[in-house]
Image (cartoon, rainbow, N blue to C red):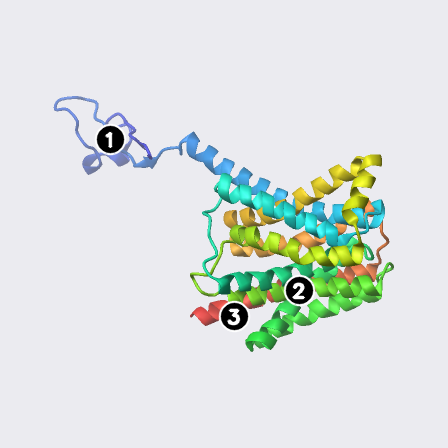
Amino acid sequence: MVEVQKWTTRRSSNPRLEGGHVSSTSAGSNDQSVVLDMIPGTPPSEGRNSAASATLVTAGIVASWYASNIGVLLLNKYLLSIYGYRYPIFLTILHMLSCAAYSSAAVHCLHLVPPQHIHSKRQLLKILILSAVFSFSVVCGNASLRYIPVSFNQAIGATTPFFTAVFAFLITCRRESPEVYLSLVPVVLGIVLASNSEPLFHLFGFLICVGSTAGRALKSVVQGIILTSESEKLHSMNLLLYMAPMSAAILLPFSIYIEGNVAAFTVEKASRDWTIVFLLAGNATVAYLVNLTNFLVTKHTSALTLQVLGNAKAAVAAVVSVLIFRNPVTVMGMTGFAVTVMGVVLYSEAKNRSKAIAVH
C-alpha cells in the first residue's frame, strides 16, 4: 500500500496557509494541524527487490539462451572438424534422444507446461512430416560445420527470412507487401558478398548449409499450415517431446547406411579416451538447453525484444567463433554479414508494420 504522510505547521508560520487553508483540530488551541499535501510514500523495499529480481532472472535467461546457442555451435564445430568425430548424422541422433529424455522430464516431472497428447492418426502424420523436415535441417546444419567456419555458417543462417517468404508464396500463395520483399534484397546481397570473399569457402559445405537454412524456413511454414486447428496445436515443449524421438528414428537408418557402425567406433574411442564421453554428453545436453532457453526467453520477453536478441545472436556467435578458432576473415566478408543482418532487421520491421496495417 502507499502510505499518506501528514505534515504539521505552526499557525502564522506561513502566511500562505492562513484563512481557508487552515483546518482547526481543537478549539482554543494555538497549534493547528494542517494537511499540506497527499504525498506518496517511498515504495516498499519489497517491491523494488521484486522488480530487480525479475530483471536479473530475465537477464540470466537471455544470457543462458546466448550461451547455449553459441555453445552448441562451438561444440559441434570442435567435434566434427577438430576432434575428428566425423559423424554428423549420429551426432544429431544423440541430440534428438537428449531432447526427448529432457523434454519428458520437463513436461511430466517438472511440469513446466501442461502435458498434451496426440489425439488422431492425422495429427500423428502431421508431426511425422514436421519431424522429417526438422531432421533434414538439423543434420545439414551440423554437417556443414565440418566444412565451413561457424561465422560463415551463421551468415548463411541469417538468410532464413528470404526462404520463409519464398516458401510462403510457393506453398500458400501468400503475398507480402512490396516493403517486405524490398527488405530481402540486402539479405541476399549480403550473403553474396560474404560468400565471394570467404577465405575458407567450401562448395559442399555452403550448399548443405543453405539446405539447412531452407529446411528451417520450410518447417516454420509447414507447421503454420498443418497445425492450425486448435485441437491439434501443441506447445513448443510438447511438440519437441514428440518430434525428437521421431527424428531419431528417421535418421537412424541413414546413419547406419552412410556412417556405418558409429556406436562401436564410439565405444572403442571411449575405451582409449574418456574425453569423447563428456564431449558427447555435454553436447547433447546443451542441444536441449537451446530449446529450453528459447521457450523461456519467449515467455519472459516481448516479441520485439526476441527479434532484436535473435538478430544480435548470430553476430555474437560469429565473433566468438572467430576469437576461439582463429579462422581468417576479410573486411568484405564482415561487410556482407553486416548487410545481411541489417536486411533481417529491416525485414522484421516491415513485417511488423504490415501486421499492424492488417489489424487496423
Which residue does the image show at 52% across and 67% down from the upper left?
A: 226
| Amino acid residing under circle 3 | Ser
How far across and down, in percent of the image, does residue 208 sit?
Answer: 76, 63
Report the side of 6 relative to 69 (left or right): left
The nearer-to-camera label among 3 and 1 is 3
How far across and down, in percent of the image, does residue 233 sit?
Answer: 47, 59
| Amino acid residing under circle 1 | Val
Quadrant, the C terminus: bottom left
Q: Which residue is mark 2?
A: 215
Sequence-first tag of 3 and 1: 1
Q: Nearer the viewer, residue 169 or 101?
A: 101
Which residue does the image show at 51% across and 35% down from the upper left?
A: 53
Q: Nearer the viewer, residue 283 or 156?
A: 283
Sequence-first tag of 3 and 2: 2
Confirm or deny contact between disc 3 and disc 2 (CB under 8 A): no
Sequence-first tag of 1 and 2: 1
Q: Which residue is mark 3?
A: 354
Report the side of 321 relative to 311 (left or right): right
